[in-house]
Every structure is written in structure tokens, then in C-alpha cells.
Image (cartoon, helix red, strand yellow):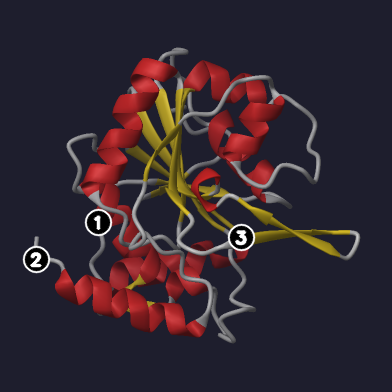
Amino acid sequence: MTDTTPHTPHLTPHNYVIIVAGGSGSRMQSAVPKQFLLLHGLPVLMHTMQAFEQTVIKPVIVLIMHPNFHAYWQELCSKYNFNIPHQLISGGETRFNSVKNGLDQIDCDSNALIAIHDAVRPITSAGIIEASFAYAALHDNAVTAVKSRDSIRQVKNGVSVSLLRDEIYLVQTPQTFKAGLLKKAYEQPYTESFTDDASVVEQYGIAINITEGSYENIKITFPEDIAIAELLLSKKPSA
């Protein structure tokens, strides 16, 4: 594992994933960020990286992390003998800035594919990842999402209105884009409406394509999510 600096040569293959590991752990009521919590005997983040390493895509992994945790991460890699190759890059003030930092280290042609993934989605299936890359290769972008299972109401000015459940999708990651498109979109100035990478690209004027996710592709956010993820991982066959 290497710690990328401004003097490190930029990356050049054709498939990449930027894994954003900037969580603080506040909602987990934890002393350490949630990406470092143990899940099935390994830190959550290691499961996330394994999910990409175990695909046929095998993208170059660019890991974005607050610099305060770089040394701790290196200690964890040593402790668990974790040797999946990756570039470790410092995050920015916002998720937008963190992703932009990662993009700045990727030197590739405009048709290369770059996925963005939450560090705390550790059990994303190989099928979901591979489908995202395949669809983006043909259609410029692919955003993983699932239909809402629940009835939805929107509240505006104190008035609630029912929305059609079949028209509501819950967005997940990975979100995969042609490199040229994604880099151009990230040249825009930051606004608070940028909630994910799809919103940045959409603001740039590009229609977003949805690819099918899974209700098991959960994001570790609250303490009970670790127990759910443990159960889901226990159902998976051993690699």
C-alpha cells in the first residue's frame, strides 16, 4: 500500500473505484469511524474493498480518507495482513471535495470507467458492481438503486402528499461514470444540492441511468446495521 502524494505518478489503467471513507462514527455512537468497526472479524472497509477485488472488473482502488486516520488504517492493514493494492488519498471538507481529490489523481482517457462507492457498503455483490461498470461503458453512467418498498409521503409547508411508490427509487452505490464526463462535472463549483455523484453529474446536464441494486446492499449507519450485516454475511458462501 502506498500513500499518494502530489509527487506520486498518476494512475493509468481503465477501471477505477473511488471508495469514500470519511465517516466520523457519530451516529454509530462509536469512538472510531464506522468504516473501521469490526464486521465478521475484519474492519468494515476491508470487506468493501474485497467486494471490488473479487469481481472480474478488478478496478484500481483509490481510497479517500481523512489524513488523521491514515496511520491508523496502515496499522489495521498490518494487523489483519490486508494486502489488496490501493492508493490512499486525503479527503476534503465535503464528500464532493474528497471525490474531486481522488479524481485529480486518476490520469486516464475519457472512456475509462470510474465508480464511486461508500466505504460502509461492505456487502455489495459482484453482480451489482459488474453490471454498473458494464452499463456505464455503454451508456456513460450507471447509478445503483432499488425501488421503495414503503409508501411514501412528501411534506411541504406542513402539508403531506402521497407519492407513487413505483416512481421512487432509493439510491445506493456504486455509481459509475465515464471518466471524461465525471471529471467535467466535478469542475463545477460545489453547492449543497450535491448529495451524491449522480446529483453532480445531473447538475452538469446529463440524464442519470438507474441500474438494479439490492436491499441487502446496506449502508452501515447505525449500531443495529452491524448486526444486520453480520447476518447477511453469514449467509454468503465462503470465497
Q: For marks 2 and 1, give the CA distance.
A: 22 Å
Residue closest to the far left: 238
Q: Which of 53 and 237 is in front in this view?
A: 237
Q: Circle 1 sits in a helix, a strand or a loop, which is it?
A: loop
Q: For marks 3 and 2, give the CA distance.
A: 35 Å
Is residue 48 placed above or below 139 in the rendered structure?
Answer: below
Classify 10 Å Cα crowding around label 3: few (below 14), some (14-19), many (20 and above): some
Q: Which mark is residue 152?
A: 3
Q: What residue type is labelled 1?
A: Asn
Q: Position of residue 204 (x, y in %)?
A: 69, 22
Q: Position of residue 69 (x, y in %)?
A: 55, 66
Q: For marks 1 and 3, give the CA distance.
A: 44 Å
Q: Name the residue under label 2.
A: 237
Please indicate whether residue 187 sits to the left or right of residue 63 in the image: right
Q: Residue at left 29%, top 79%?
A: 230
Marks 3/2 in contact by CB < 8 Å: the verdict is no
Q: Name the residue under label 1.
A: 83
Q: Where is residue 183 in the image (x, y as percent from the top left)?
A: 59, 23
Classify 10 Å Cα crowding around label 1: few (below 14), some (14-19), many (20 and above): few
Q: What residue type is labelled 3?
A: Ile
- Select label 2 or label 1 by which is in front: 2
- Select label 3 or label 2 by which is in front: 3
Q: Which mark is residue 212?
A: none
For marks 1 and 3 on the same chain, the one whose residue lies earlier in the sequence: 1
Q: Nearer the viewer, residue 199 or 170?
A: 170
Please indicate whether residue 153 sits to the left or right of residue 181 in the image: right
